[in-house]
Amino acid sequence: SSSSSSSSTSKSSLTSSSLTAVDTSCENKLDTMGEGLCALYTANGVDCDEYFCDDCTYAGLCDELCDFCIEVEEEDEVSTNDECKDQLDENIGEGECSFYEESGYACDEFFCPTCAGKGYCDSFCGWCATDVDGTITWYER
């Protein structure tokens, strides 16, 4: 019987384009949007190696469940203020920020710059704006 256990070495290269921030903790970031979402997705056929790997569509969202935990040096961290975007919409699909807000995850209580969901819906919630010349303005409430 052969085992398909893979080493974490192949999963240790992290691309900043797939996440808004690199975090040294090992967690299921998708679960911050609703407890058990990672388990729900994987139970319904969403494969870790095809969807949650570090260069996959949903990179970084279910690292703990998929055993994709990485160690990151301090200087390798990526700033959350380098782009004004809706990472949740980019990772899961257009309209996710709206869906989560309608489901009770308020911008000022969950997606704010100091909240658990920071970086996921920055543009949608009005925390930032990008001018036509590419200048990003960040707002605080």
Image: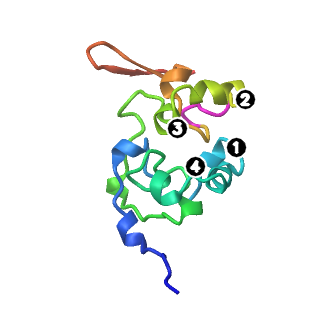
The verdict on residue 47 being magenta is no
Q: What residue type is disc 3 on? A: Ile
Which residue occupies 64% across, 45% down? 32
Residue placed under numbered mark 2 in the picture: 103
Q: Is residue 36 left or right of residue 73?
A: right
Q: Is residue 34 left or right of residue 22?
A: right
Provide the residue span drawn in magenta.
109-114
Q: Position of residue 30 (x, y in %)?
A: 60, 46
Which residue occupies 67% across, 31% down? 109
Q: Position of residue 106 (x, y in %)?
A: 68, 27
Residue placed under numbered mark 3 in the picture: 92
The Cα atoms of the two marked residues, 4 and 1, are separated by 9 Å
Q: Is residue 26 above or below residue 33?
A: below
Residue 34, numbered label: 1
The verdict on residue 110 being magenta is yes
Q: Main secondary structure of the magenta part?
A: loop
Q: Mark 1 and mark 3 in contact (Cβ < 8 Å)?
A: no
Which residue occupies 70% across, 43% down? 34
Residue 29, numbered label: 4
Quadrant housing the C terminus: top right
Q: Nearer the viewer, mark 4 or mark 3?
A: 3
Sequence-first disc among 4 and 2: 4
The Cα atoms of the two marked residues, 4 and 3, are separated by 12 Å
Sequence-first disc among 4 and 1: 4
